[in-house]
Amino acid sequence: MTEEAKVFSITTPLYYANAPFHLGHAYSTYVCDTLTRFYRALGYETYFITGSDEHGEKIKQSAESHGFSPQEWTDKVVEDGKKLWDRCGIEYSYFVRTTQRKPQDHYLDVQRFFKRIFDRGDIYLGAYEGLYCVGCEKYLTEKDLVDGKCLEHDTEPVAMSEPCLFFKLSKWAPVVLEMLEAEPERVQPESRRNEILSKLKAGVVDLAVSRTKLDWGIPLDDIEPGHVCYVWFDALLGYATAAGLGNHLDELDKFEADPSYEIKPTRFAKFWPHCVHVTAKDILWFHTVIWPAMLLAAELDPVDRKKYVTTGTYSHGYLLERGRKMSKSIGNILDPYPYLDLLGSDPLRFYLLREVAFGEDGSINHEAIAERTNADLANDLGNLLNRTLAMIEKDAGGMIPAEGPKNS
């Protein structure tokens, strides 16, 4: 294995900062943190990205309902979220905020990336008229609804009509489909991959990627005055911003101005080709179709467009509370702190990773946590530790023996 191949990069979703982080977020983050620790122990150079998604209509509504400006509200949510990750023992490499200007200028990265696609003819001005779910920050069609409501939030979407910039998703969807069929590992588990393939084969329309009836977003005045970036286009780019997209775009600009220029190595070029996403199943379409299409359209490598499409996306199920997905919109989220205070961070990590099969939905309740902690940690591992210590005391005079053929 080459040294270049001994690189591992991973991302959690960028958690939507309309309310405090909850136990479902902790599950995703524990998964990524644990995988990062595993690969680091194997000698890999690792880069673990997490962060917060802070634009969109739902953020603005939530801030106003609490008497804050959107920036004040997201500042509070993020500060509390970082404290929670510290309490959970999460060791991320970079926490990106989609409102940040320093140390990485996410605003500028988004504007430059958007303009790059626009200049290549893959973004055009049009008008959107249809349904929009504020809870999902997602455009919907009638076939996405159940009894006229969004399946995720059990609410009726709003009718919306406004001028928008559109991304030619229909142009790049066949390329994405070809990649997913040729490389099954790009979307796992297989059941989720099959859902994505089925939806792709049913046909894809172009995606509205700007808003004009909302001001809480990244402005796109250099392209179309009065437009702000669609929250999902903005949020997906947070991963790349955290990986150093800005420096990579600087190098591309120099090369495109002078083809004899030799592009210098960047953090983005090092980690991004080895990056995987961990995400929940409800946002899989954004990560496995829209995001690869954006990366292809931006042409981030002068020779191979596919080079900087992330390696794969792994979808976990929902952490259920009383049989329902935890949702800040529904109001059934679970606060991690009581579990952390009762158990500590490592037993909570153990329970979530042991009890919830990755890719499947899992339930959480006090009784199950107590049973798993007592049975696996206190009884099994605790007894093993005590017996091992007793054997060392009895047979080795209380000293751990030197490594040898019988104890290696």
Image (tube, rainbow, N blue to C red):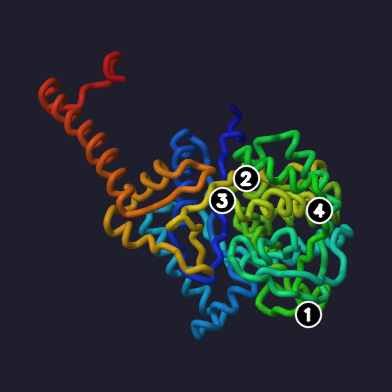
Marks 3 & 4, CB-CB < 8 Å contact = no
Q: Amino acid at mark 3?
A: Thr
Mark 4 sits on what residue? 204
| Of 278 and 143, the residue lying toward us | 143
Q: Is residue 398 left or right of residue 369?
A: left
Which of the two discs, 4 and 1, sits closer to the camera?
4
Q: Which mark is residue 226?
A: 1
Figure check: 74 above or below 9? below
Counting from the top left corner in percent of width and height, residue 1 is at: 59, 27
Q: State the residue at coordinates (57%, 52%).
A: 280
Where disc 4 sits, the SS reads: loop
Disc 3 element: strand
Query: What residue type is disc 2 on?
Result: Thr
Q: Amino acid at mark 4?
A: Val
Q: Which residue is mark 3?
A: 11
Q: CA distance from mark 2 to mark 1?
A: 34 Å
Q: Look at the image and tell me whether residue 109 can be seen.
A: no
* Circle on res. 302: none
At 39% across and 63% down in the image, what residue appears?
Answer: 335
* Gap between marks 2 and 4 measured at Cα: 20 Å
Q: Are marks 2 and 1 in contact (CB under 8 Å)?
A: no
